[in-house]
Amino acid sequence: MTETLNWDHTVADVTDLPAAIDYFNSKGLKFIAGEKHEAWGTEDARDYFGLNYLELITVANPERAHSFTYENNSSIFTAVEDYFNGLQRFTTIAIRTNDIAATRQRLQELGLEVGEIINGERLTPTGNLIQWQMFCVNGELAHYLPAPFFIQWGRDDDSRRESLKSQGIIKFHPAGELFVKRAIFHVTDPQEAAKQWSAILQSEVTREGKDFIVRLGDKELKFEHGDENRLFKLIYHGAKESQQLRLGQIRLDLEKEK
């Protein structure tokens, strides 16, 4: 099987989930409360833009959230740390693969320390069984930039899309027919960061002035100079009117099509 990678979703850490939902929905998004992650003591809310979605995550059970380790859970562990430090910001992005074993093996061969593949499943309120596999990278990339994590869903993209539409999960947004176009990372060494991500994603790097871009299908990861060494902002196209949404350090730019 040929390994195919796509940008699946983005994780943002919030300290007050209902307040975050209210804020973003007041701007024309459509977040709905998602699920509790009993093993991690966290809970989330999601808004879908096609198959790509934005996940807001927070701590629901502080005692449980303090009890699991970084290994195999790097993105969730970071979300928990952010919650207790009062930070609202992006963690990283999840990459969807159609062959998770091959992806994991390839990243090991690149020299990355990767976690074990974990099986997950849950029942939706309507009784639909959702299954997936995932693994995390146990460590940061250069200059402490958080690495992506990887997921493979139990159904192919077309059947998942139709199922999510029929359940009303992929839906109309008052702000417009939004779709994510670009993730902007602020890093101290844009060229080095782009080179690492291009190897991880098997995609070429192009230069745009002082910045570097790694393309993933019809979407882009742009690496600009900055001290944060974090995912800095998401750019969405298709908005009825341009807006800049800000919650803590979470930045979403909704851009009107020209």
Image (spheres, grey):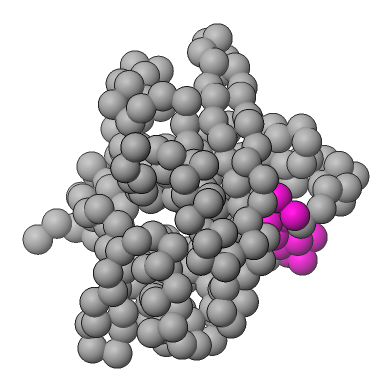
Q: Residue at x 67, y 45 (%)?
A: 116
Q: Residue at x 65, y 37 (%)?
A: 118
Q: Could you say which is closer to the camera, residue 69 or residue 176? A: 69
Vertical placement of residue 215 versus 171, above or below: below
For this orientation, the residue located farthest to the top is 127
Q: Could you say which is closer to the camera, residue 116 or residue 150? A: 116
Q: Is residue 75 magenta?
A: yes
Q: Could you say which is closer to the camera, residue 253 or residue 195? A: 195
Q: Is residue 207 magenta?
A: no
Q: Residue at x 43, y 44 (%)?
A: 96
Q: Is residue 212 left or right of residue 18?
A: left
Quadrant (top left/top right/bottom left/bottom right) for the C terminus: bottom left
Please indicate, yes or no, whether residue 160 appears anywhere in the rendered image: yes
| Quadrant in the rendering for residue 98 | top left
Quadrant (top left/top right/bottom left/bottom right) for the N terminus: top left
Q: How many marks?
A: 0
Q: Position of residue 229 (x, y in %)?
A: 54, 78
Q: Residue at x 22, y 82 (%)?
A: 208
Q: Which residues are magenta?
A: 71-86
Q: Is residue 11 left or right of residue 239?
A: right
| Quadrant in the rendering for residue 161 | top left
